[in-house]
Structure formats: C-alpha cells, structure tokens
Image: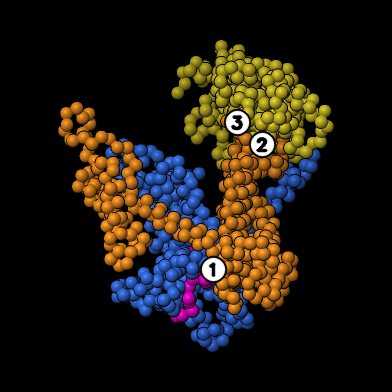
Chain colours: A yellow, B blue, C orange
Amino acid sequence: MAKRIEVSDLNIYYGNFLAVEGVNVSIEPRSITALIGPSGCGKSTFLRSLNRMHEVIPGARVEGKVVMDGQDLYSPDADPVDVRRQIGMVFQRPNPFPTMSIYDNVVAGNRLNNRKMKKAESDELVERSLRGANLWNEVKDRLDRPGSSLSGGQQQRLCIARAIAVEPDVLLMDEPCSALDPISTLAIEDLMAELKDRYTIVIVTHNMQQAARVSESTGFFNLNGVGQPGRLIEFNPTEKIFSNPDQKATEDYISGRFG
Amino acid sequence: MTATKAPTPSPPQQRAVRRLGDRVFAGSAKGSGIFILLVLAGVAAFLVSEAIPALTAPAEEIPGGEGLTGYVAPLIVGTLLGAVLALLVATPLAVGIALYITYYAPRRIAATMGYVIDLLAAIPSVVYGFWGLAVLAPALVPFHRWAADDLGWLPFFAGPASASGRTMLTVGLVLAVMILPIISAIAREVFSQAPALHREAALALGATRWEMIKMAVLPYGRSGVIAGAMLGLGRALGETMAVAIVLSGGAGATLNLIGSSNPSTIASNIALRFPEATGIDVNTLVASGLVLFVITLAVNMLARWIVNRRADFSGAN
Amino acid sequence: MSTETQSPVLVAGEPGAPIRARRRLPRYAPLGLYAAGIALGAALSALTGFSTALTVVYGAVLGTLAVYAGSRAVEGGRKATDRLVTALVTTAFAIAMIPLVSLVYTVLEKGLARFDATFFSNSMYRVVGEGGGAYHAIFGTLIITALTAVISVPIGLLTAIYLVEYGRGRLKRAITFFVDVMTGIPSIVAGLFAFALFTLVFGNDVRLGVMGAVALSVLMIPVVVRSCEEVLKLVPNELREASYALGVPKWRTVVKVVLPTAVAGLGTGITLAVARVVGETAPLLVTVGLITGTNLNPFDGRMATLPVFAYYQLTQPGTATQAFLDRAWTAALLLIILVMALNVVARLISRFFAPKTGR
C-alpha cells in the first residue's frame, strides 16, 4: 500500500511569486517524514503540492516532478482528484463535516463520490477506519451523533479515520496537533506510530520534540528573507538532524539560535 | 474514472484534466451569471425597442401634443421632487435610528428593535399607499392649511392648500417612511463596524457618548450613510404604487408641495395610464420608463461606487 | 432618559472624594422636567383646541429644552450636548415607530371587516356589490409567486455559486456590480421589460400570468444572488479542503458539502426574497392585469393577484363603495399577514436548519 515519493527540482509558484524553490527529496514508504522550519518557509506549501491541494488557490502552479512509485502526479493526464484519492490529508484544525454524523463523516470520501456500498460493507469500513484511528471504543455507541459533538482531539482522530477510509497510499498531515492539548497530541502521535506500518506519512510540525519523537527522516525548510523563496536546506535521518546536522542553519534553528 | 483528455500544455499549465461533472456544473453556474448580464442588457434593449416609436413620432401624436420632452419633463420634476423630499426627511431620521439602535438602546432589546425597523421594509408598497391615502393625507390637512397661511412666502408652500392632503408633501413623507429602513439598515451596519479601538480610545480620553460618536463613529460611517441615502433615493425614485394611490397628480411642473394639482411621477404615471393605454401611448409610457431606468441606474451606480470605494480602504473583508 | 451609571452627587472639593467629583443632575431631574414639559404642552395645545398629538410634540420639545438648559447650568456644556443628542436620537426612533404602529393598526381595524370565509372561498365573478372575495386573487398570487421562485432560485443560486466558488477576474466583478445595479431596478421598469419582451414575441395586448413571473424574477434574482452569496461565503474553506483532500471533485464538494452546510442560510435568504416580491404590485399591473373570475393557468390570459386586486378595489370602487373598500383593506391585511408569515418562516428556517456545531 505505502508508496515512495520522489520529488525532483520542484518549484512552486503563486501567480508570479516563487514560494518554494528547487526541492529534491525522496520520501520513504512505511515511515514518518517530518518537515520543520520557521513560519512562512514553504513547508506547508510543499506538503500541499504533494497531493495537488495547493491548486485550490487560484494562480498556484508548479514546475518539476513529483513521482509516486513511477506515476508522475503532474503529468498532463493525471487527474488531481485521483491524486488526492491516493494521497490523503489531515489539516491543522480538525474539520469534520458539520452536517454529517460521525458515521457519515467516516464514509464521506466514498459517499461523496457516489460509490455505492452495502450496509454491512460500510459498517465494516467505519469500524475498521475508526479502530485504525484509535477512536472506535470512544464513539461506537454514538455513531449517529454529529461529528462536531466530539472533543478537539477526537475530532482530529475522526478526520484521520475519514482520511484512511478512502484507503490512500500516503497520508499528509499539516500540523495535525497544533490545535490540540498535550493529551490529545500524545494520542495522535501514538496513532501515527501505528499507521506508519501501512502508510507513507509526511507531517509538517512546528514542534521539534514532536518531529524528534515520531519521525524517521526530517527535512528542514528555510528562507533567506522576506519575499525570497523557501528552500529545503537539509534532509537527513531525524537522529542526525537533531544531533549532528550537516548545515549550520539547521543547527541554529534546532538549538533555538535563530533570528 | 471520467477523466477527459484535453490538449496537453506542459507545466506550468496544469489545468489539463477536468471532469465532465465539473465542467457541466461550473459551466451552468457561469452561464447563470452571464444570463443575468444578458437580462440586464435585455431590459435596456427591449425598453429601447418599445420606446423607439415614441422617440420618432411627430410631436403632436404624443399625448399632450408637446412632444416626448414636453410629456416627460413635468414627470421628471415630480419624480425628483417627491424623492428628494423623502430623502431630506428620511436621512437624518435614519441616522438617528441607526445611532439609537447601535449605541443608545439597551443591548438586550437592540436586536429586536432593528428587526422591527426592518419590518417597515417588508410591508408591500401598495399597503403604504392605502395608509397614506386613508391616514396620513387626512392627518396632514391641518398642516397643509397652516403651511399655506404662515409659510406661503416659500415657493414650496405657495398654496392654495389641498383639502384632501393628497399632495407631493404627503407623498414625500410616505416615501420617507418607505426608504427609512433601507438607509438605517446600511447606517446601522457601518456604525456598528466602527473600530472598537477608536471608540474605546475616545471614551478613555474622557469623551461623553456623543463626543465618542462624533470622533470615532460618524467619520467612519459617513460614506456608508451617503451610499445608503443614495440607495434610498433610487428606491424613492422608482416607487410606484404608493405614489399612484396617494397623489392627485397629472398637472404641470410646479414646486408647490401642498397644492391640489401636482406633477405626477414617472412610475405612478405609468401605473395609472398603462392598463388603458393603446398604440403610441404605450410607446410613450415605455419611453418614460426608460428615462426612469436611466435615472435610477445612474443613482444606484453612484451609490455602489461609493460603497465599493469605502470597502476598498476600510479593510473589511 | 439617562442610562449612565449615576454616582452619588458630591460637591467638588469635599474632603474624602477620591476623584474630582462631577456635579450631576439628580437621577429624577430629567423625568421631572419632561413631565413639566408635557403638562405645559397640554396647556399650550389647549389654547388651539386640545389635541394629544400636539401635547406630545410640545412636551417632547419643551422637556428636551428644559433638560438641556438644566444640564448646561449644572453639568456644563459638554454633558448638556450629550443629553440633547440622546434625546434627539431617541426621538428619531420614536418617530419611526409612529407610522409602523399606525399602519398596522389601520390595516387591522379596516381589514378585519371582511376577514371571513366568503372572502377566502369566493371570487369576484359576477359580483358588483357586497359579498365576493379574493379566492381567485389569492391563488393567482400563489401561482405567480411560485413560478417566480421556480425561475429565480436556480438562476440566483447558481450565480451565487459561480461568484463564490468559481468566479474570478473581470466577469466576476462585472456580475457582482450589475447584480447590485439590478437590485435598484424600479419594479415598474421590470414590468415594462416583461411587457416589451412578450409584446415582441406574441404581439400587442398580450397579458399572461407568466409575464408577471418574468417581471418579478427580474426583481427577485438579484436578491437571491446577494443573500446566497453572503451565506456561501460563510462556509469555512476548511470544509471544502477536507472534501478535496478526500478526492472529491469540486462540483460534488459544492453540491454535497457546501450547500448542505449553508442550507439554513440559503433557505432564509430565499424565503425573504419571496417575501420581497409577493407584495409587488406595479409589475403585475402592467403584465398580468386583473380579472374577476378564477384563472389558474399562468400561460393563458389575465390572472387576478392579491396586490392588484387590492389596488383596484380601492381606487375603482363600484356602486357599493364601502363593500369595495372593505375588500381592499382585507386584501391589504392578507398581504401583510403573508409577508410577515414569510418573515417568520425565514427565521424558523435559520433556527432549525442550522448545522449543529458542538463548538
């Protein structure tokens, strides 16, 4: 299921503004890759370009290649909708659909695409996804309640369940814990550790302890100044980044000596 | 998968693949928008096409025998007179109401009060006409008499006073009531958006409530009030039924507000004459409607321009 | 009058006063001054033959002046101006209430005379004097309004969707601007437009219910667009993104996520738009006309509608004048009830269909 993503010479533009420049990286399957860096350095933009979510913003475009197991995501006949079905995403703030129950939220990806499922089949999918997101025991008695009735941490796990219910190969997480309290954060981190056996996970985080705790590899993004494009400064195994980084800028950022 | 292949411009153009459903849906949404533009163009075009016979007809065939200009001119005077009178009465009242609801009324009932004022806007104009004819006109007869006696030196109150009260003055007041909620709704909105920081800063300097409003609220809301007044003016210019019912019109142009013979307004003239009109009369009425359309269009565009200019620098949205 | 918090009256310089104490009018002073003003006003109006209206006017003016003068003497000019403005602003609101109360009272008083079963079950067919009703006009109004909604809601809603979800650049700006302009089209001009359009197609003297619906649509579409646009803008972008990230195409996202989330606001806006056109008279006067019998087919000849019915009953009474006037006022009452009911429905929709948020 999990797939490798190869990114080569990727430039990301918003209109004429070059937001991210020259990214070359290979993201390993069945592992967690963390992206760290100061605010506005383009790490979220880069993450969103991996499943073409940045195209939602008018004028956004990319140059370069993103290849997932031999399939070029940006080839002219690649459909962004199909790309997103294979590469799921979890957002900074939990965003369950307010008009839907917990149950409907989990099957939303299938139901919104009009995929017909038998009742037993979708029941099975809901339980599997919610168990996968470590939420089943908490909500199994109230699946018909609105998704927004849950706590923030539960909502975020519901969103993860919703994302894995469409059975993607890759899971992108854009600061998934930044709106959560420490206990919910811990629950999500535990969940990520379980999920990485089956998925390729890429997570953007501002929390360096989190990156150090959960990830195998870490990429450090930085920019030279306001209006300059963001760049991937260093990409290495997490252990190395946090103990003995190659680049001075990385070390400065990690040790907090950074402007 | 319904992925459809399109010509393949290489990156950075990535709009190659679009689904059928997306194209149909986006197309119909866009089509509806364009349709609205067409309707507006159609309004102008059809009015012109129906008005052309009146524009080209010889002067004596136009009702009144003085040509189209001679026919429409007194109507324009009547239209402007009633609308401007309404505007003069309604604007200060509307500003007062808006201030009362935003800054003076007890918080708990302010919302309800706003709702009640909004109800004024919901009442059909024909009902306003009924009320103007049955209640306001008779109630104003003493005022008409007094104005003719004591203010007769003003051209507006030249008299002789109408005995029925069905005058331009009464019409102006009915129209004022009708546009009051429009102006006050917009004024309320801009007043309530006045930056809290400025308001609190004014209060912290020891300003009284009125000084705070003068310093922090009114300057901020001025263009909004002007735009609201323009929208109200547009509504008053085009108001038909209330005027048709209340006004005893049909006379030539005059500034006298309280006499028994008043110039009609364009809109009410159409409503009164159209059902029985035939031939060139119809074209004449449509031509006068075209004039009204142009006037209100100009007023509304001006209002929108003021609103949009404000939106540009206020940073709202 | 005054709603400020009152501090005890302290004399300036009194020992122990923590802050320089301000001299203030006692709390009951404004009330007393207004009462005095009213009393004086009653006396004044009695000079010219007593009238309640004049008493209130004189009383308000005199009371305000007295409070202003008193405040100026005791509290100083700034505070006095503040009190004056408070009085003015409150008066403005009170003045606005007068027509509303008077109008509702008059319509109720005169309209209840014929608010009976005959009015709802009979048409005016072969009625020249008393009796008769607005059965034909009520159904005419319902049919034409429904037809208007059928035309306006899809176009208005789709345009709003275009503006919020798809629109960009010049076309979006043009549509936004001209929708705004369209809201200002006088209703009689909309009627003339429908008249001109149908005259070109069907020849002279055509009168159809559907013409009225087209005219009303010109008035209703921009209202629907504006209110739907506002509501759709309120749907958080996060929900759209969540849907896209699940691999849902944009149009399905709009139809199945955005619209259901906004359904309460959309329902409210559309209901209010219906309320706006249901009482329109002028466009129907020039396109639909009026008949005395019942015609429920909007594609065949003239129809009766409630506002036009009310208008003609009032302005062209037959021999039994009072019977015509009574019917006119009852029709007016019915119109107000209809509009108010739609307003209440709109509020209920926004209350009961709003998405339940746990946050």
The CA distance from mark 1 to mark 2 is 44 Å
Q: Indicate whether B259 appears above or below B31.
A: below
In this rendering, position of residue C136 left or right of residue B245: right
Which residue is nearer to you in this view: B296 or C300?
C300
Which residue is nearer to you in this view: A63 or B73?
B73
Please tell me whether residue B237 belongs to the stretch shown in magenta: yes
x, y percentage for residue B241?
54, 68
Quadrant placement of the C terminus of chain A: top left
Subunit bearing disc 2: A
In this rendering, position of residue B217 left or right of residue A104: left
Q: Magenta residues?
A: B234-253
Kindly identify which residue carries mark 1. Answer: B241
Three-letter code for the amino acid on which mark 2 is drawn? Thr
Q: Residue at x 57, y 54 (%)?
A: C340
Subunit bearing disc 1: B
x, y percentage for residue A100?
68, 34
Kindly identify which residue carries mark 3. Answer: C358
Kindly identify which residue carries mark 2. Answer: A99
The answer to whether any part of residue A118 appears in the image is yes
Q: For the residue carrying disc 1, how many other residues have a C-alpha within 10 Å: few (<14), some (14-19), or many (20+)?
A: many
Disc 1 to disc 2: CB gap under 8 Å: no
The answer to whether any part of residue B84 appears in the image is no
Which residue is nearer to you in this view: B317 or C214?
C214
**Same chain for the residues at labels 1 and 2, yes or no?**
no
- Quarter where residue A92 is shown: top right
